[in-house]
Image: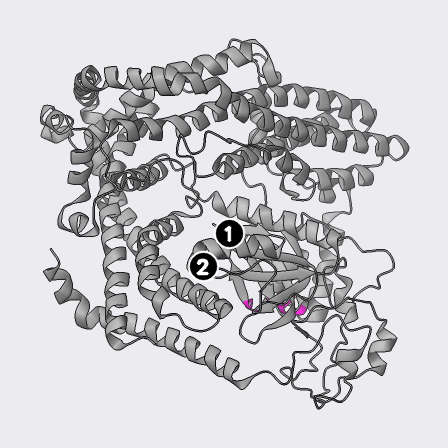
Amino acid sequence: MFTRSFAVVLGLICTFVPKYVIGEFGRLYEQQYAVALFNKVRFDIEGGGGPQPQLLRRKTPLENRSIFSGALFQFLEENKKWRNRFLFVPDSYNMNYYDNKASHERGLHPKGTINCAGYKVLTSMDQYLELLNNSLPDVKAKVGNTPFLKCATEFLLILWHPYARHYYFCVVTEKEQKKWHAVFQDCVRHTNDGLLEESKVQTPAFTDSVRLFRQAHGQYGTWEMMCGAPPQILANLVMETLLPEVRDLITPGLKGKMHERQRNWMLICDAVYGLVVRQAQAQYEAVVQSCEAGRPLLEASIRTDMDQIITSKEHVSNKIKAVALPKAEKLLKVSIQPYISSILEALMEPTSRGFSEVRDVFFRELVDMSKNTVNDSTKEKLGEHMEKISMLAFHPVKMQSCYEKVEDLSLDGLQQRFDVSSPSVFVQRAQILMREQMDDAVYTFEQILHQSLEDQGPEGLCKNIQRCQDRVIKKFDYDSSTVRKRFFREALLQIFIPYMLKQLTPSVASVSLAAVAAFPLSLILLTYCFSELPRFQELIFEDFSRFILVENIFEEVVLHSVMKDIMMAVKEAAVQRRHNLYRDSIVLTSSDPNLHLLGDNPAIDWAGEYGTGPEEGQGQDEVEGEETGDSGEAHRRRRMKQVVSMIQLDGSPILVNESCLEVPSVDGIPEEREGEGEDQDAPSSPEIVHQDPVKVNATTPKQKKKAPPPPVQPENSPSPIRDSPHCPFLKKEINMKLTHTLQVFLVGYITFNIIIDLSSMIYTTAQPLELALP
């Protein structure tokens, strides 16, 4: 199917493209790092910024916490079987899956870890097939036809990624599916937000480098794969260029049935993506380390020549404005101003409903606590309620109603005009801001209530809660208005600025890979950005050229040209009090002047202070740890508090060795007792669920003892496992065609050899051919 010459060509492509992309990104990053450092130092000296927030910000919100854990079924592509798994979601939101809960509690290494950055959570096979068909256009599957994946139940959960491996899960009930779906979406949402806002130099340098690289290749507008940590984003940037080349080369060589070609293509993508991620990780760390090593000298030079650098930059900026501003204003008047109000309204409506829902959820939780403390105002009851409320912002199920409000955001009719690939970029950003606002409100309420209890004691607890609630709600409304206005301005800039840059610069879509290999990307940027820009580089002193870049100044000129209209539109909406927005003139400067001092206090242990005493609880846990022989790490894992609690379904028995009591499907599977000596890979293994769908019915432990796993039955003989009405699965057909098995094996073997050839050809043929390319 694939010859050695094919492997050589594929190896060259997979070597040359990542080397080029990462190399040119590194050059851009070194340039943008100096510019970002200058902006940061200038901001520190001159100050500035918007209104100060009224709510406190928690420093370590998920300390000693886990998000969720439980059992569900996972489809294993290796043997095409469904297997029971225990999933644990820590505070990093990277999902770890184990064979069972005991393996997790003993501190064993997980069977695998899923970093959800870039994934989409799907709940139906039709959604999955649509995305799968788009990834390989020449091979399309019909809706409802998925021979390589037959679901054990109808309640699916699929994690889809354009480059990486796909994961398939299922549960027994719709209630479980909704809960796991909320947890999975929260994992994706959190891991996608991998760029640290606290890093005022590295993050702007990275984002500007990625944006300039894509613009140099004619790719403007929002980018859905700008998600994850910087190495992941850099790998996505490589795959954006590499994947079309690999697809054109490999697709004609894929043989077999439709689903086999799709599955083999996914395996090849995952293998190539893994190699790219490792290269991006190593080279990005090397670039950052090199820039950080030179930071002290750069910062010293900036502080010494700050005034001269600012004067030189303003001089060049004025020259560029004289040339670029008339064209930008003309474009603004014709193509931007008529659409500002409509796009702003499309952003404000769902976003404001989402923040309003956050306020309502927070208010309802406090009202419920007040009602419960009327009849029972003991310290223990207060500690129990506050322990739950403290993690409200990180409870994906309770926050789901807030997130769903903003998911209605739609830019229909405007996406194609302004090159907006999908509104998901804005939806995700709004949801992250909503979670931050909820946590700020909860943390501020905690600190104010705790201070009130220390000063006045538990007397009049309901009145104290009401007073603290009113103060926090008032601060939430003010901060919510400030955060939303900033979000609207940033979203409008993300929509309009790329469109204006694309209209003001010549097209670079025709730039070939050979051309970019022969010239540095910086020259391509200067050549294609604006026809008259290169001559302004001569106006910059050589000593200041590291901190003043012509392409950055040009974009600043374009930004300022449209910023005035955006500010005016947002201000007008605030003056009209639309969607509960406050005017900029309303500043709560005198509200709780000493509140910020509470932000330095350590986190409040409500369960320890107002619930069971920490000494008593700790002593009991230590005794349990000594009795069970747990290690320190395993003991810490077991004591870790969980944000999302388990829910036991009515009528379901308690599972002895399972964590997720809301997944009773394990009860429907006959458990194998230790010491029975049955082969786990045999068709009668109790932990393996075959892929044929069947209705799930629960069985009792007594029934499981009476039905031990039988040996493999002949094809026509009745099988207790396959024919049992209590079985949640059907056995795989024993008379599977041998040709189909051999075909899958051969394709996998050839794919493996391709990856081996990729590595071997790098050292034998890549270097001389690369030198000959220019």
- Percent from the top left, x then y, of residue 638? 67, 60
Query: Above or below — where is 772 with respect to 747?
Result: above
Question: In this orientation, which residue lies closer to the viewer: 755 or 97?
Answer: 755
SS of the residue under disc 1 = loop
User: The N terminus appears in which quarter of the rendering?
Assistant: bottom left
- The residue that disc 2 covers is 164
- Percent from the top left, x then y, of residue 456? 77, 24
Residue furthest to the right: 375
Residues under labels 1 and 2: Cα distance?
A: 9 Å
Looking at the rendered structure, the kind of residue marked 1 is Tyr
Query: Above or below — where is 683 with respect to 186?
Result: below
Give whichever of discs 1 and 2 has the lower sequence position.
Answer: 1
SS of the residue under disc 2 = loop
Query: Above or below — where is 418 with respect to 621?
Result: above
Answer left or right for 394 relative to 7. Answer: right
In magenta segment, residue 108: yes
User: The C terminus appears in which quarter of the rendering?
Assistant: bottom left
Cβ–Cβ under 8 Å for marks 1 and 2: yes
Looking at the rendered structure, the kind of residue marked 2 is Ala
In magenta segment, residue 643: no
Question: In this orientation, which residue lies closer to the viewer: 356 or 61?
Answer: 356
Answer left or right for 361 relative to 566. Answer: right
- The residue that disc 1 covers is 119
- Judge the density around disc 2: few (<14), some (14-19), many (≥20) Cα neighbours within 10 Å: some
Answer left or right for 219 relative to 371. Answer: left
The quadrant holding residue 503 is top left
Res 161 visible: no
- Percent from the top left, x then y, of residue 637? 63, 59
- Judge the density around disc 1: few (<14), some (14-19), many (≥20) Cα neighbours within 10 Å: many
The magenta segment is 102-111
The overriding secondary structure of the stretch rendered in magenta is: loop
